[in-house]
Image (tube, helix red, strand yellow):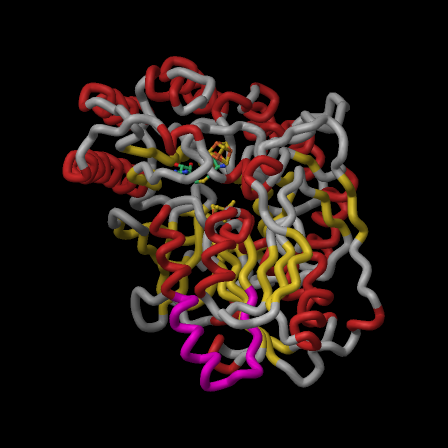
Amino acid sequence: MGKNRINLSMPSLTDAKIRKKLGIEKIKYELDPKYKDLGKGKKYFILTYGCQGNEADSEVMAGILEEIGYEKAVDEKHADLVLLNTCCIRENAEVRIWGVLGQLKGRKRENPDMLVGICGCMPQEESATKKIIESYDVDIIFGTHNRQNLPKLIYQAYYTKAKVVEVISSQGNILEGSPKIRESKHKAWVNIMYGCDEFCTYCIVPYTRGRERSRAKEDIINEVEELVKEGYVEITLLGQNVNAYGKDLDTNYTFGDLLYDLDKTGIKRIRYTTSHPRDLDLKTMEAMRDCKSVMPHLHLPVQSGDNEVLKRMNRKYTYEIYMEKINKLKELVPGISITTDIIVGFPGETNEQFLNTLKLVKDADFEGAYTFIFSPREGTPAFKMVDNTTEEEKHERLEKLIDEVNKGYKKGNERFLNQEVEVLVDGESKYGKDMMCGYSKHLKLTHFKSADKSLVGKLVKVKITEVKTWFMIGDLVE
Ligand code: SAH
Ligand code: SF4
Ligand code: F3S
């Protein structure tokens, strides 16, 4: 597009691969007073795609924007600044974003003063950033390590009318003290670490999010104590591999220790995501058993049930190790619900290897799973692996897998029939008139009859009267 460009920095795949022991900077967020009223009288809207990490980042960016005077618009049509916080985990995630960018083109024609920004994981890809610059009318392009510079980038885009690009491919930093506008008043995301050092061969995340780096435990505990004071009921600890928490800090303090300490803050419910099977240790399992606030649900992505495929995925565990860990967990936390992520059609996966995955799904008694067809990501080792499975075969495998997984969902709900469960009420339910909904301790979506909006954010007891594959229905127990 024929617009000037300010390139503060561009992404580099080579730099994104670098892992050094030193060089992680802790940044204390500070607003340059020059930007104080930059957004006064203007409205913003953030469209968030991808994982909970992006949702948490959007809350930080909303905080920064409101601090400089922006107000939240009802939707992107009424905004002076639209930010797209993007994901590139699979090709279809990207296809969706290209579509949205296309639609925004038209809107910019109607309102030439509107600013469009794109951030999150997509700009971290060299090829995506190149395409955004060349083919789309986007004013600000910035990466996952640059979000604290948002006021500066908006300022430059406004006053120079140029396209501003700032994407650093580095190990990343740790941002503390930034403002935050949380979406919910009773559930909160709490980042405990950033980045990933696992380098699973199919995955783009280690390149888009930088090195595995843990926040100081004091900063995490303080944040949770504040949340308790503000009346929050549930927190979800976030990281790409939370079980590696602390490994980069050179102390002996681990994720299990953190769970024990957070349990003492008085928060009622603690969840965490995501776990890597290799790093899930006994201390964490014991914390799940001992801490009343840690919920009896674990999302533990397995990806495949075949040892040879697991090896080529660089997952560093086997079918046997995975089963051993979840069996130990079931012994320590009776009734725990376990969910997972599975990829079918990894390059070279044979039908026999796929059947090993199906077997594992049966053996593990998963109560839910996100299932994906392998999607080649440029720059990852699996991108270049020979793949001779046809699309048709991959879809057949996915369907068989989904059938098996759905049995697990249903079975997982059935065990609560005629039982009382504790539900944290999220809001009105779309399931029926005068119904509310929320999640049980085992993370089961539960609908119940009530029109009492004052229940939102409260823990209530619900007696389950009916179960479906995806949710449960019950009556409020007075
Ligand atoms: N850090 C988390 C989640 C990362 S992304 C973890 O390790 O579990 C969420 C899921 O997307 C992964 O668990 C994996 O199942 C899937 N995924 C990642 N890259 C993929 C790819 N290239 N193709 C298909 N699925 C992928
Ligand atoms: Fe990706 Fe593996 Fe890291 Fe998860 S653990 S983010 S799948 S590289
Ligand atoms: Fe997507 Fe980036 Fe999260 S690629 S899944 S938004 S870490």
Going by the picture, which residue comes out furthest to the right? 33
Work out whether residue 408 or residue 390 is closer to the camera in this orientation and state it.
390
Kindly identify the residue that appears in the image at 64 percent across and 56 percent down: 166
Q: In which quarter of the image is residue 323?
A: top left
Position above or below: 361 against 185: above
Q: State which region is magenta.
A: 100-117
Position above or below: 161 against 60: below
Residue 103 horizontal/vertical position (percent) = 39, 72
Residue 192 horizontal/vertical position (percent) = 65, 40
Work out whether residue 362 or residue 29 is closer to the camera in this orientation and state it.
29
Kindly identify the residue that appears in the image at 73 percent across and 65 percent down: 152
Q: Quadrant of residue 25?
A: top right
The quadrant the C terminus occupies is bottom left
Most frequent secondary structure within the magenta stretch = helix
Q: In the image, 402: left or right of 20?
A: left
Kindly identify the residue that appears in the image at 30 percent across and 68 percent down: 432
- The answer, for residue 298, to whether it is visible in the render is no
